[in-house]
Amino acid sequence: MSITVAEPQVVVDLIDSSQAPLLARPYYQGSDPGPIVAALAHVPEVLEVAMPFISALYGPSALPVRLKEIVVVRTSAHLECRYCIESHSVVALDAGFSCSEILGLRDLDDTVRERWSSDEAGEPALMEWIDAVAGATGSVSKDSAGRMREYFSDAEIVELTLLIGATMMLNRFCTALGLPSSNGTLERLRAEDLL
């Protein structure tokens, strides 16, 4: 199944540095903070707690960047979040993913695990886990949980699952508010034939 995502229509004004409330100003120092911060700046007391949480999950940790990007791109494909698919396809490119791998993560047909080109242990189990957590409702099957336990520690499963959940939250936030991708992101995706 191929993903077709509608063009975003920005629902709220994105706050620029000249309008930023006092509590939000640290996120504007030196550069454009991006549309997530520019939207969250409307509620600076939430921005103050949300950004450290988001940074902790998406920033450096014991998990390899490759696993994190598998989670973000595949979860975002399930929730059809244009902003997150586009921005994290670029992050995945920078992390060393091939265009073919990125397209595989974005393609939700049932054969992706059979077509997955990486021989990294655990990646097919992780994609199955993402599909069960982000692409379904109810509990996750014991078989899927068992496959995760073959490759990942309890701490890794907790972090990966929390990353899936946080990505789902951000997917809905970005999609509902119609947050736009940057021109630089779109140019890079066009150059890589990923748009």
Image: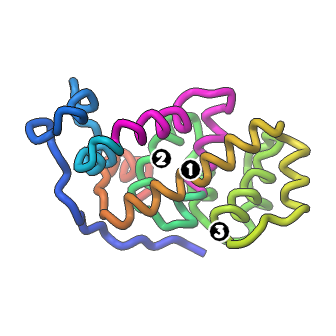
- Side of 177 where 63 appears, left or right: right
Residue at numbered disc 3: 135
Viewer-nearest residue: 141 or 184: 141
**In the picture shown, does residue 146 fall above or below 10?**
above
Residue contact at pointers 1 and 2, CB within 8 angstroms: yes
Quadrant location of the N terminus in the rendered image: bottom right
Residue at numbered disc 1: 72
Q: Nearer the viewer, mark 1 or mark 2?
A: 1
What is the three-letter code of the residue carrying label 2? Answer: His
SS category of the residue bearing label 3: loop
Asked whether residue 183 appears in the rendered view, the answer is no
Magenta region: 47-74
N-term mark: 3 or 1: 1
What is the three-letter code of the residue carrying label 1? Answer: Val
Residue at numbered disc 2: 88
SS category of the residue bearing label 2: helix
Asked whether 40 falls inside the magenta stretch, the response is no
